[in-house]
Amino acid sequence: MVNFQNLKTYESSGIVQHYAQLQQLQPAEAAILTQLKDQLPTMTMLDMGVGGGRTTQHFAKLAADYRGIDYSSGMISACQKRFASSIDPNSFTVCDARDMSCFADNTFDFILFSFNGIDYIEHCDRIQVLQEIQRVGKPGGYFCFSTHNLQGMEQVFNWRSHLSYNPINTYIELVIWSLHRVFNRSYSLQQLQSSAHAMIRDEPHNFRLRTYHIRPQEQLIQLASGFKNIKVYSWNQGIELSPKDLSSNTDMWLYYLCNIQ
Ligand SMILES: C[S@@+](CC[C@H](N)C(=O)[O-])C[C@H]1O[C@@H](n2cnc3c(N)ncnc32)[C@H](O)[C@@H]1O
């Protein structure tokens, strides 16, 4: 079932405006663009959860064919307006990732779900979305997405990790810690530590969004049935992480690049 609170947040004009002015690729996205650059001119690309078109301006001009979808009609209108002079407005469609029946099987060579867009979907729907991606993607095609790291959130939930010798920093950090605790009363630190994934209200957009967080090792298991050659990248350094480092990684989110089976 759709999370209406998340959809309402992504439909609100202030949030649409926020995403419509974003420009830069994140370092992991830039690294992945560099890897795929030579192939993009022959690729059909699907940009899922396109938001206000931050990634459009980097990818659309390179791909042979570019489509952007989002379940927020406000985001799609913002993209159509932002790229009115360069991209056919029909390239942007209101579409929920859970049901991409408007696209035939084996349509796309490259599917991107950037900036944790997949995390605003509940667990059982996430599995359905991964199956939809596998269906509309060509076998051997690429899927790239980012997702929040539960191990990063564990640090946020642990008050001890917010103590420092600077009393002002400690005060600010503990206020943020207490807000996380207030907005997530149903989760204790111990519960997070024993969970493979969890829906958490986190700080961006003033705790309005319920956001999926998952352990990297668990994400690899989730992908195993439909995807292969999975690589994991630090979002802010753009470097590929080795599998042995994943269980101790505490980045707030990570990028994944894989091939569709
Ligand atoms: C964090 S924003 C990122 C926007 C854009 N990709 C960017 O990087 O700036 C997440 C986006 O995913 C979209 N989204 C969330 N759930 C979705 C779903 N079930 N189907 C399609 N889009 C969805 C939201 O509307 C929002 O635009």
Image (cartoon, rainbow, N blue to C red):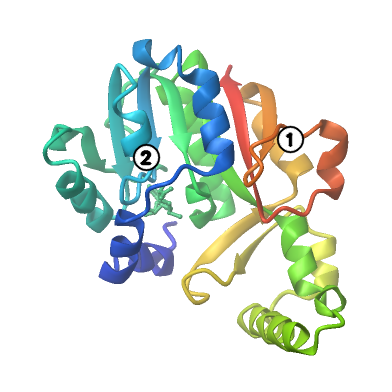
Give the x, y percent position of residue 252.
67, 56
Pointer 2: residues within 10 angstroms few (<14), some, or many (20+)?
A: few
Q: Which mark is in front, 2 or 1?
A: 1
Which of the 4 image quadrants contains residue 127?
top right
Question: Residue at coordinates 30% horizontally, 55% vertically from top-left?
Answer: 20
Kindly give the residue lying farthest to the front in the view shown: 166
- Figure quadrant of the C terminus: top right
Kindly give the residue lying farthest to the left in the view shown: 85
**Helix, strand or loop under label 1:** helix
- Figure quadrant of the N terminus: bottom left
Residue 247 position (above or below residue 153): above
Give the x, y percent position of residue 10.
35, 62
Residue 137 position (above or below residue 249): above
Question: Residue at coordinates 61% horizontally, 81% vertically from top-left?
Answer: 183
Question: Residue at coordinates 63% horizontally, 47% vertically from top-left?
Answer: 236
**Helix, strand or loop under label 2:** loop
Give the x, y percent position of residue 41.
35, 13
Residue position marked by numbered label 1 in the rendering: 221
Pointer 1: residues within 10 angstroms few (<14), some, or many (20+)?
A: few
Tell me which label, 2 or 1, sits earlier in the chain: 2
Which of the 4 image quadrants contains residue 165?
bottom right
Q: Amino acid at mark 2?
A: Asp
Query: Disc 2, ligand 1: is the CB inside 8 Å?
Result: no
Residue 180 position (above or below residue 149): below
Q: Is residue 128 left or right of residue 103?
A: right
Q: Is residue 162 left or right of residue 110?
A: right
Q: Is residue 151 left or right of residue 142?
A: right
Q: Amino acid at mark 1?
A: Ile
Residue position marked by numbered label 2 in the rendering: 99
Query: Disc 1, ligand 1: is the CB inside 8 Å?
Result: no
